[in-house]
Image (spheres, rainbow, N blue to C red):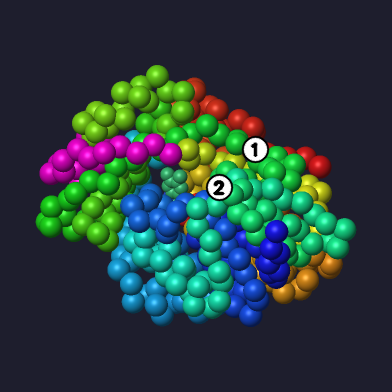
Amino acid sequence: METCCWDVIILGAGPAGLALAARLASRKVLLLERQWAPAAGMRIGESLPGAARVLLQRLGLLEEFLGGDHLERGASIAIWDSNAPVWRDSLRDPSGPGWVIDRRQFEQMLLNAATQRGAQIQYGCRDFQVSRGADDRWTLALDGDSTRHVAPVIVDASGRSASLARRLGLNHIRQDAQVCLHSFLMVPASDEDTTTRLVADEDGWWYSVRLANGRRVLAYHLDAKHPERIALQQPEALLNWARRYPLLADVLAQVQPAEIHCRPAGTALLDIVNLDKAGPGFLAIGDAAITFDPISSQGLFHSLASAESAATAINAGCWHNPHAAQSFKQELLAVASHYLAKLRLTYQGPERFAEAPFWADRTMPLCRLPEA
Ligand SMILES: Cc1cc2nc3c(=O)[nH]c(=O)nc-3n(C[C@H](O)[C@H](O)[C@H](O)COP(=O)(O)OP(=O)(O)OC[C@H]3O[C@@H](n4cnc5c(N)ncnc54)[C@H](O)[C@@H]3O)c2cc1C
């Protein structure tokens, strides 16, 4: 069996894994990706807060990003705390409005940066074995591949599956069985509305925003066990259900139904408290560490930010420097606890639905950090 030595092995070439690889330009980095090729289809997750500007700048990609097809985020109009629409713009936000990104272009930019800075990417990686040798290095062997990959640092960037962390015995706990039904609707050229429209109803919450590519996303977040979930996966049914709300009907009047996709969309947390129990030199970033509820619009920001923190930990020798590993862990813990507190407040907002199961489940203190 051939052995290949690396400085860092990253499992997962989504935004987090790619951003980390792009940051580790001076190191020998291997990215292992389960898909057979870079993602080509449309993917939900388009809202990037203005605070990401500084992360993109430090990644050396701000100029390229600003030259892309991303739209400046408009105001939001929300029917949330009460039945009256509340308009919010970013005038007082020092970070600026943020963007509605072209997700495919954004990931392609990260992919180009990672490969141009020397990272190797291997696609089509299915199952793997991972172990830690007496020489304090990790060995990763892919099924159907005769090469063993060896490195002092391995990073889980496999998204909410947290495949590597779970393989190493860490829990990745789904805190919430929310799913998102969504559709990318073709819009007429006359649709120049830039607002993000949010509506809370008894069984969940909706949003719709126009994308850069002539489409509009319509998304409904509800409990996975909702009795109407399967029926709502019919394109006409979802659109008609949304049109009951004037705030949404206003921007959905001229669109045709389109294919419905369903994705898990609730909070999930890695057992961050016990991160070090996986072994020195193991890190988790992006959704593999903290999977954010889409209501927070923080997932991509966290992917970039945790990639930056992981790069700092790696550059400080986290596999033999407990202080560097500890700082990384403390940062994740602080982010998770701040996020959980804020999330609960958000779901407490629509008091008129406090008794409805969707809202009652999400305002109970079930969202907590795993204990040591
Ligand atoms: C409905 C919905 C709406 C969202 N909206 C927003 C939004 O508006 N704004 C925002 O910031 N965020 C949003 N998000 C969240 C955002 O999409 C994620 O936070 C982001 O994609 C996380 O990036 P990641 O790289 O950690 O994980 P992912 O994007 O999931 O990438 C993980 C990669 O790892 C690969 N992989 C998985 N398992 C393995 C394995 N065993 N071996 C090798 N590779 C593997 C996957 O194929 C994938 O390429 C939304 C999420 C959902 C579900």
For residue 213, above or below residue 368? below
Q: What amino acid type is highlighted by mark number 2?
A: Arg
Which residue occupies the foreground of this view, 317 or 73? 317
Q: Which residues are magenta?
A: 241-263
Tell me residue 343's x, y (percent): 55, 44
The answer to whether residue 144 is left or right of residue 359 is right
For residue 21, above or below residue 355? below
Callout 1: CB less than 8 Å from ligand 1? no
Residue 247 located within the stretch drawn in magenta: yes
Q: What amino acid type is highlighted by mark number 1?
A: Ile
Q: Which residue is mark 2?
A: 126
SS under mark 2: loop
Residue at the spot 43% in from the left edge and 39% down from the top edge: 263
SS under mark 1: strand
Q: Which residue is mark 1?
A: 173
Residue 302 in view (yes/no)? no
Q: CA distance from mark 1 to mark 2?
A: 23 Å
Residue located farthest toward the top when viewing the structure as drawn: 227
Which residue occupies the foreground of this view, 56 or 94? 56
Which residue occupies the foreground of this view, 213 or 344? 213
Crowd rating for badge 1 (residues with CA inside 10 Å; few <14, some 14–19, many 20+): some
Residue 16 figure quarter: bottom right
Callout 2: CB less than 8 Å from ligand 1? yes
